[in-house]
Amino acid sequence: MALSVTLNSMVDFLWQGAGVLAVDEAIMKFMAGDDVVLDRVLFPHDVRATIAHVRGLQRIDVLGEEDAARLCELLTELLGLFKAGKFQLDERFEDGHSAIESWLTEQAGDLGARVHTGRSRNDQVAVATRLYMMHCLRDLARLEAAIASACLEQANTHAMLPMPGYTHLQRAVPSSVGLWL
């Protein structure tokens, strides 16, 4: 596969300082790849983590009460738009984090850019990933409870239904479906 680079296909990102040349689109594609696609799964958790971060910034007086309330309101709106399919993570964004910051900056100007204060990308990834894993574990626990409940129900229904017993691929003491379940 040939990599074609055109000098006029440059992209500007939030992390670029003033006077820094734009990053070539092909190079950005190589570096970021499908990050934005993968971030679609993490996005709701990243937004929730950003809301918590904003509240933390308010607690330590980096953000005032009104500014924090405005950012939390906007983040809640963004989460709703994302869930409704009205906000898409696509190639416009390097990743979910930059999408959040871009959208906030578009809605609230410089205030939107302040959500990144005291927060690294690594921190954002770690927190969103942890929240995602906690969400998955809660779902798994609910499924496991449903399976256990179904097995117990069947065990009670078939408590005395005889079933052959086996050990080491040999017949053994008979048991019941209820005991097995």
Image (spheres, rainbow, N blue to C red):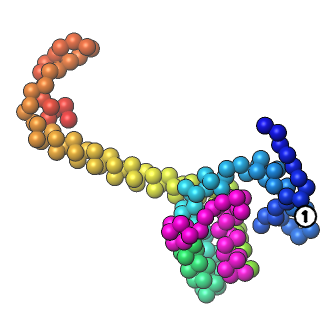
The amino acid pointed to by label 1 is Val
Q: Which of 145 and 4 is in front in this view?
A: 4
**Residue 112 percent location from the top left of the image:** 69, 77
Question: What's the residue at 39%, 49% (across, down)?
Answer: 140
Q: Is label 1 in a helix, a strand or a loop?
A: loop
Q: Residue furthest top?
A: 170
- The quarter of the picture where residue 66 lies is bottom right
**Residue 116 percent location from the top left of the image:** 70, 69
Residue 3, relative to residue 179: is it above or below?
Answer: below
Question: What's the residue at 76%, 50% (across, down)?
Answer: 29
Question: What's the residue at 57%, 61% (across, down)?
Answer: 43
Q: In this view, does 82 lie to the left or right of 109?
A: left
Question: What's the residue at 7%, 33% (across, down)?
Answer: 160
**Residue 88 percent location from the top left of the image:** 61, 64
**Residue beneath disc 1:** 20
- The quarter of the picture where residue 130 lies is bottom right
**Residue 177 percent location from the top left of the image:** 15, 31
- The quarter of the picture where residue 42 lies is bottom right
Residue bounds of the magenta highlight: 80-109
User: Residue 84 lies in magenta, yes or no?
Assistant: yes
Residue 17, relative to residue 7: is it above or below?
Answer: below
